Image (cartoon, rainbow, N blue to C red):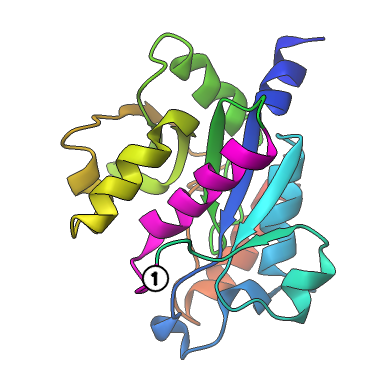
Amino acid sequence: MSDAQSNQNLTVGCVLCGGKSRRMGGVDKALLDLDGTPLLKHVTSRLQEQVEQVVLSVNEPGALHESLELSLLADKLTGHLGPLAGMHAALSWAEKHSPDARDVVTVAVDTPFFPMDMVEVLVSHRNANAECPVICSSGDRDHFAFGLWPIALADPLKEYLLSGGRSIKGFFKDHPPIIVKFEAHNGVDPFFNINTPEDVPIALEHLAKLRVQ
């Protein structure tokens, strides 16, 4: 088995589908059409190329989520505690259902251009730092929704949430991450995310640039 295949087997992928999409007018961004394909399918397909199994973190799944025939994970902790609750649900699921896995890699459903070698790169940094989250960065921004989370962090993350913690940055005070920088490709920031209707035509331009490579 190659190192890349081993990484796939040891890493569970999770698409974070939460959020109210207020800047998108309340429309579920997972359903957003991008060049004839729902955003959720763009993101899920891209992640499935890099890991053995993918789960969806979603509290109110619809027909599209269910049609992908993937495990749908609602938050295990009540109270709409934010993206960390989705990460905790994925870590807890992997702990129970994928006992050979070492990590969960998370991606956001509104960011369809993340690198095709992202998991491989993150795992290469994790190997020397087994206890640390490994977080993606591009330009001058860190992207906390995109990272590799050791499954051993499931309990510390639960404790942090139950103590009232909500921000990822706050969790990092006791669990400092490794930051891995990714460069733009064909002029496209790999972590460009679609937040507003105005971002859709920009995303289509990015998609065209990436196809001409």
**Residue depicted at 18% across the width and 60% down the height:** 164
User: How many marks on residues?
Assistant: 1
Residue that protrudes farthest toward the bottom in the picture: 25
Q: Is residue 111 toward the left or the right of residue 140 in the image?
A: right
Front residue of this view, candidates 78 and 35: 78
Residue 139 can be seen, yes or no: no
Residue 20 coordinates in the image, percent (x, y): 44, 80
Residue 166 counted in the magenta span: no
Above or below residue 119? Residue 90 is below
Residue 145 can be seen, yes or no: yes
Main secondary structure of the magenta stretch: helix
Q: Is residue 82 toward the left or the right of residue 149 in the image?
A: left
Quarter of the image where the N terminus is located:
top right
Q: Residues within 10 Å of mark 1 (few under 14, many from 20)?
A: few
Residue 152 coordinates in the image, percent (x, y): 43, 29
**Residue depicted at 68% across the width and 65% down the height:** 40
Q: Element type at marker 1?
A: loop
Q: Which residues are magenta?
A: 78-98
Residue 159 coordinates in the image, percent (x, y): 27, 47
**Residue depicted at 40% across the width and 63% down the height:** 77
Q: Amino acid at mark 1?
A: Thr
Residue 111 coordinates in the image, percent (x, y): 54, 57
Q: Is residue 128 toward the left or the right of residue 105 in the image?
A: left
Front residue of this view, candidates 134 and 193: 134
According to the image, label 1 marks what residue?
78
State which quadrant residue 70 falls in: bottom right
Above or below residue 27? Residue 67 is above
Front residue of this view, candidates 133 and 39: 133
Q: Is residue 61 toward the left or the right of residue 16 in the image?
A: right
